[in-house]
């Protein structure tokens, strides 16, 4: 056991360096032992991996909906509220025919595990809800139309 230096003992650089080297060597040997231990062995995953391959969970293919490029025109007095981000519609807070005030939350989007509210830019009546809860939405895509 190494004694800690005290005010009465002078500091010995040689002794300190020797202590540092022994600690470093001990740390290196423990790290090597830990990395070679069975705790870090990847074989426990092999049965699960085989099951995932067997039942089709390893590779997931889903068909993306084709983007539809449709030009939509709104009435001159329509107020179109767009999505500021790409994500999904988590919750619609309004319904068609409902009167809304400026600043009122119309919908809540989910993007990157964050909830992003969409607000009415001015007072109006909801004429169209263009998406439903759970729908995917792109940045700049129209979500709600007011009049």
Image (cartoon, rainbow, N blue to C red):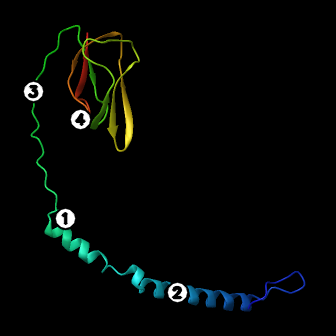
Local crowd size for mark 1, using a 10 Å CA cut-off: few (<14), some (14–19), many (≥20): few
Front disc: 3 or 1: 1
Instruction: Using the image, determine if residue 50 lies above or below residue 64.
Output: below
The C terminus - image quarter: top left
Residue assigned mark 4: 138
The label number, if any, that marks residue 58 in the structure image: 1
Q: Residue at x 21, y 28 (%)?
A: 131
Residue assigned mark 3: 70
Instruction: Using the image, determine if residue 76 lies above or below residue 81.
Output: above
Q: Picture quarter containing residue 101?
A: top left
| Local secondary structure at mark 1 | loop
Q: CA distance from mark 4 to mark 1?
A: 28 Å
**Residue 57 x %, y %:** 18, 62
Q: Picture quarter containing residue 37?
A: bottom left
Q: Residue at x 37, y 44 (%)?
A: 113
**Residue 92 x %, y %:** 30, 26
Residue assigned mark 2: 30
């Amino acid at each position: 056991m190494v004694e800690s230096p005290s005010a009465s003992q002078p500091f010995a650089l040689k002794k300190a360096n020797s202590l540092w080297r022994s600690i470093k060597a001990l740390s290196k040997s423990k790290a090597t032992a830990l990395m070679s231990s069975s705790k870090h062995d990847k074989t426990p995953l092999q049965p699960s991996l085989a099951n995932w391959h067997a039942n089709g969970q390893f590779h997931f293919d889903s068909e993306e909906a084709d983007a539809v490029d449709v030009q939509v025109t709104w009435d001159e007095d329509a107020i179109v509220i767009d999505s500021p981000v790409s994500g999904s519609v988590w919750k619609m807070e309004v319904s068609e025919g409902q009167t809304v005030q400026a600043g009122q939350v119309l919908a809540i989007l989910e993007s990157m595990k964050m909830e992003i509210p969409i607000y009415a830019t001015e007072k109006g009546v909801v004429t169209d809800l263009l998406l439903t809860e759970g729908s995917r939405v792109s940045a700049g895509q129209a979500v709600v139309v007011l009049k």
